[in-house]
């Protein structure tokens, strides 16, 4: 905002000096549009600043680093902990032969890919996430792994996940919303990673109220019908035994 105020202040100072610029030989149209151009540049710069996103989340996993690192280093294992995949069971996932790029296509969450860009001494991993649908966006993921010693003497790993991206400028007014959503998604993903490493499975799933409700009603209906048939069968057996 300081830059914006500076540009606007400069524009205000230029306007009263119009005659001086005319004396120097500057055309009148240039003097007229110069403040507008300065204000436009300041506005565009402000939009670019507001469209920047940066989120960092971290978690402590009660396992040594050599058990945590492979779950992130190998993109084929992302489908077990990355928060996007449980959303759509019908998602189409493709993994390159070199295990460095993963792409998916889904009717619910869109189309995107994740590709490894840097791997440094089992401490830092950098990926680039590129979204095609519902809108185009390129995101930088940075994972850092620090092995620590817990109070009981066992090894534990602190994992931090930093995301840097830029929203389309026409979404600048939704910056806080996207920051909140990104934070929630990262925290969910890290919790899934922790469960996967510590428990060998992720004890959570995303439910669909529509389909899950129908499935539950169908299950109760089938259970009720089976119970009714069993009561009729027992009644017939008791009558036959009395006869």
Image: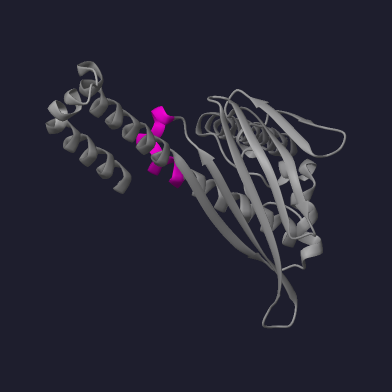
Residue located 40% across and 31% down the image? 171
Which stretch is magenta?
Answer: 169-180
Residue 136 picture location, percent across and down? 56, 26
The front one of 153 and 41 is 41
Residue located 35% across and 35% down the image? 173
Horizontally, residue 133 falls left or right of residue 89, namely: left
Q: Is 176 part of what is drawn in magenta? A: yes
Above or below, 203 against 174 in this view is below
Residue located 74% across and 42% down the image? 116
Residue 102 picture location, percent across and down? 74, 35
Residue 224 visible in image: yes
Above or below, 113 against 82 in this view is above
Above or below, 164 against 48 in this view is below
> On the rendered image, what quadrant is the C terminus found in?
top right
The image quarter containing residue 106 is top right
Residue 189 picture location, percent across and down? 61, 49
The front one of 8 and 180 is 8
The front one of 30 and 125 is 30
Q: Residue furthest right?
A: 97
Residue located 59% across and 31% down the image? 215
């Amino acid at each position: 905002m300081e830059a914006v105020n500076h540009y606007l202040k400069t524009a205000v100072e230029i306007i009263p000096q119009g005659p001086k610029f005319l004396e120097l030989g500057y055309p009148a149209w240039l003097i007229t549009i110069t403040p507008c151009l300065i204000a436009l540049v300041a506005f565009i710069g402000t939009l670019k600043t507001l469209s920047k996103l940066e989120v960092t989340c971290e978690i402590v996993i009660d396992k040594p680093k050599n058990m945590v690192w492979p779950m992130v280093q190998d993109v084929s294992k992302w489908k077990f902990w990355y928060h996007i995949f449980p959303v759509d069971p019908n998602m189409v996932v493709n993994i390159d032969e070199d295990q460095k790029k993963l792409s998916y296509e889904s009717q619910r969450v869109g189309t995107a890919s994740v590709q490894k860009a840097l791997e440094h001494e089992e401490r830092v991993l950098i990926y680039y996430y590129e979204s095609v649908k519902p809108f185009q966006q390129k995101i930088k993921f940075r994972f850092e792994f620090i092995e620590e010693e817990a109070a009981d003497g066992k090894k534990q790993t602190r994992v931090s996940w930093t995301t840097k991206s830029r929203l389309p400028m026409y979404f600048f007014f939704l910056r806080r919303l996207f920051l909140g959503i990104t934070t929630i998604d990262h925290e969910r993903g890290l919790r899934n990673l922790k469960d996967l490493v510590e428990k060998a499975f992720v004890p959570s799933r995303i439910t669909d109220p529509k389909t899950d409700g129908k499935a539950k009603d169908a299950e109760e209906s089938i259970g009720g019908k089976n119970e009714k048939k069993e009561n009729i069968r027992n009644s017939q057996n008791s009558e036959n035994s009395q006869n």
